[in-house]
Amino acid sequence: MSVVIDHRPGRQQQQRQSAEAPKVRRDPAPSRLKYRLERMWLRPLYRRVVRIGLPAFLLAMTAGIWLSDETRRAGLNDGIAAIVDKVQNREEFQVRMMTIEGASPAVDKALRGMLPVDLPASSFEIDLTALRLQVMQLDAVESIDLRIKPGGILSAVVQERVPALLWRNARGIDMLDKDGHRVASVTSRATRKELPLIAGEGADLHTDEALALIDAAGPILPRFRGLVRRGERRWDMILDHGQRIMLPEEGAVIALEAVIARNRADDMLGRDISVIDLRDPARPVLRLGVDARNTIRAAQGLPALGPDGQILDEQKGG
Amino acid sequence: MVELYQTQRAMRNIRRAALQRGVIGVLDIGTSKIACIVLKFDGTGTDRETDGIGPMAGQANFRVIGAATTRSRGVRRGEIETMAETERAIRTVVAAAQKLAGVRVDHVIACLSGGHPASYGLNGEVPLHTGTVTEHDVASVLAACDTPDFGRGREVLHAQPVNFAVDNRSGLADPRDHAGNRLACDMHVLTIDGDMIGNLIQCIRRCDLELAGIASASYASARASLIEDEQELGAACIDFGGGGTGVSVFIKKHMIFADNVKIGGNLITQDIAQGLRVPLPVAERLKTLNGGVEATGRDDRDMIDVGGDTGDWEADRRKVSRADVIGVMRPRVEEILEQVREVLDAAGFDYMPSQQIVLTGGGSQIPGLDGLAARILGPNIRCGRPLRIDGLAHQLTDPSFSSAVGLALFAAHPQDEWWDFEMPADSYPARSFKRAYRWFKNNW
């Protein structure tokens, strides 16, 4: 409340003026307009419209008006395309060479032919996923690891399929890997002598069983000629001299092992037996060769039979 | 009466609509300050029990979400004098409370203290045709109360059924389904000047608000500051306001008398300003900071800087002792209490079973007032603060806000008034029957 009055000359007048200046009291009441606006602002719908609706509408309208002109739209598209192009063609994204590991020359050549662009190219232009799917369609390729390494190298690590079997079918002879997938075709049996031969419709679907049978055939392997899939159901093992082991549908390996054990004991396969029928493992059946049968018939005093089952005329046969 | 019945009923409907929307404002227009409280009604509030807040005397279904107070303008002796000024003050306080609450207030319940309130005790009696009291009988007994001539331009502010009697069984709060031959009721009617209500409605309407209820300030402050037992057993609430002192008498949870003494705190300030020759703001400061009614020896030595901005060094360096201030205030406070005594005598307060007196309002904060009041009014005196309501800021819980808090309680749980009952059909004007008949004829 106490006011210090400055009595120095010159200051005095100033002081008096400020003291005499009428104090304008500010009216704390909001004006009618301000009051109404405040109340309107407190209305939730209005608030939402002003805060979200109006800016969004203005933004959309500005963008729409600006884009309604054809040349501006084209210019915008060109600009965007130019920027994208500029970024993609930077030195850092260039792919200069392709390295392929673990591929045979034929696959290597096919791979290089599949690359859709000429190197050097931007890495954005090489669609690795599509390229990988395309490469995976080659039968000889089991898996491929495609990646772009720093330094602009497109690296492909290829794992090729290893042929394990030859499959003779109606279209020719195919090489199969251990899963039964085709690797390549061969023109004749002689080109890949080291591979065992299988035949028959549906044989490629059971290559694991075929391989197990071939593994189990150890001691008679020198006499082994091939496996034939019968009725897409069971295997026949063909040995040389026209001998055939008819294996059951289930437990083929066990049945084969039983034959091998019998062979080891009795030299069964060295005798004149044309077919060992194990289709019912509980009741094995042997089919004797023509000479063996005729020897038995001669010992019984019966006339000899020919291969067709007819009685041979002694005079004719002599 | 019928027209008033319709307006009060319309206000009740507005109040119900506001409660449905969940937000209602409370506007206490006093002579020294205007307070606005924004209430949010949010269900039962059952989770508050777990928060360590008690049941709050059944007032737990609302919460204060915004409260503001401002100095009153344009109000004198509890009556709106300058409408434009009062409107600005209402705008100020409503805008501030809305800002705090963050919601828009559309409906307000207001109270006013002036307007020459007058209490009437009416009684009516009807025979019961069915032998039991039905809702219709209650309405008709309320309508059958013989109304005296209230005077020209008087409006009924409260019309509360206080007591029902069936045959010779009196003191019934709810007479429905009682068996008997005769239903009688006592009704307390409070009338005030109709122009005062009109002015208030006009002011509130100009602020784009809708009036959802109106109450007497002395009734509201008694609702807030009398505890339930006092309301039941009988008590008087004395609301020391700025422009007047409200007196209301309660018994059996009903107000049975209300009046207004036209001397208030502003007159005390005026006395100090005149007696000590200080400007009014200084006098107000002296009263609130150093006021009292009991002088002690120490008060003689307690010198207070009066201060001033007159430019006269001698006048600005003046000091008064606290005893001087008390010496000016005490006669005026005594006069107020004497007049309150007269009002209570007129109301027959001496014949009440319990004579509890509760002092509230801003003036009740004068130190030593309860001692002085005990000498003049009676031995059972206490200073009452308003009931605690949920969410009200601490600085708004002092006694001067008791009428605002009482209005909040009034908004949440209004007592039954005459217009809460359906008006009996025979007192409807015949015109409406004709209209209904015509409607049926035209449409069927």
Image: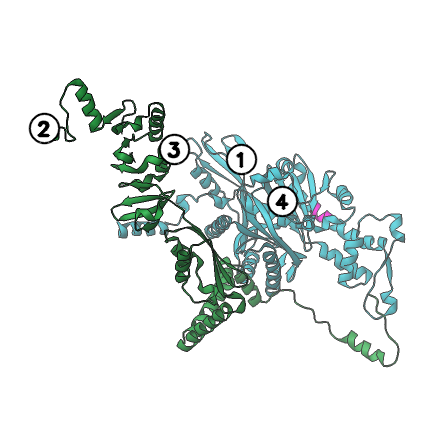
Locate residue B361, reporting x and y percent.
69, 49
Q: Give the structural element (helix, strand or loop) at label 4.
A: loop
Nearest-to-viewer mark from 3 and 4: 3
Locate residue A29, reporting x and y percent.
63, 64
| Residue at numbered disc 1 | B173
Q: Are marks 3 and 4 on the same chain?
A: no
Q: Are marks 1 and 4 on the same chain?
A: yes
Q: Is residue A310 left or right of residue B265?
A: left
**Depth check, front residue: B364 or A109:** A109
Asked which quadrant contains residue B29, the reply is: bottom right
The reply to whether residue A77 is in sight is: yes
Residue at far top of view = A300
| Residue at numbered disc 3 | A218
Disc 2 crowd, CA 10 A, few/some/many (<14, 14-19, 20+): few
Q: Give the structural element (helix, strand or loop) at label 3.
A: helix
- Amino acid carrying label 2: it is Gln
Query: Gap between marks 3 and 4, in whole Å?
Result: 99 Å
- Amino acid carrying label 3: it is Gly
- Amino acid carrying label 1: it is Ala
Locate residue B213, reporting x and y percent.
53, 51
Label for residue A315?
2
Nearest-to-viewer mark from 1 and 4: 4
Query: Gap between marks 2 and 1, in whole Å?
Result: 144 Å
* Magenta span: B337-341
Q: Which chain is green?
A: A
| Residue at numbered disc 4 | B389
Query: Gap between marks 1 and 4, in whole Å?
Result: 27 Å
**Depth check, front residue: B429 or A149:** A149
Query: Gap between marks 3 and 1, in whole Å?
Result: 112 Å
**Measured along the vertical axis of the image, is residue B29 above or below residue B136?**
below
Q: Is residue A41 left or right of residue B221?
A: left
**Measured along the vertical axis of the image, is residue A271 above or below residue B291?**
above
